[in-house]
Image: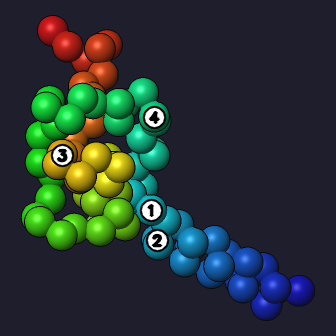
């Protein structure tokens, strides 16, 4: 019985360590709805979606002439 508990805890630890965004909550669609001209680059050219999300940024490659990996929209509650 102890072996099963240790295995379950180990699996939970591994899943927690390798979760996307390194413990950060996933960004919402509203946070990532930034107009193409207002996007601020968040990664090097050619960055993929996984690396972009791991930096805590938004990724949208649907607009060919826009920045694909970009910072999210600031939270209105945090503005002074």
Describe the element under mark 3 as helix, strand or loop: loop
Q: Which residue is mark 3?
A: 66
For disc 2, the neighbor class at 10 Å (few under 14, some 14 to 19, many from 20) is few
Q: Which residue corresponds to the image point at 65% horizontal and 79% vertical from the top-left? A: 11
Which residue lies at the image location 42% right of the left edge and 41% below the top edge?
A: 27
Gap between marks 1 and 2 measured at Cα: 9 Å
Residue 79: give x, y in percent of width and height.
20, 13
Camera-near label (2 vs 4) is 4
Q: Comparing marks 4 and 3, which lies closer to the viewer?
A: 3
Q: Which mark is residue 17?
A: 2
Q: Residue at x 14, y 30 (%)?
A: 38
Real-space Cα distance between discs 3 and 1? 24 Å
Q: Residue furthest bottom?
A: 3
Q: Which residue is mark 1?
A: 20
**Residue found at x 20% / y 35%:** 36
For the image, the number of numbered tags is 4
């Amino acid at each position: 019985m102890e072996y099963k508990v240790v295995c379950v805890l180990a699996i939970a630890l591994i899943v927690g360590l390798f979760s996307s965004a390194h413990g950060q909550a996933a960004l919402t669609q509203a946070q990532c709805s930034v107009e193409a001209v207002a996007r601020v680059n968040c990664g090097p050219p050619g960055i993929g979606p996984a690396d972009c999300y791991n930096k805590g940024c938004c990724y949208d490659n649907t607009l060919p002439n826009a920045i694909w990996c970009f910072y999210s929209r600031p939270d209105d509650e945090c503005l002074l």
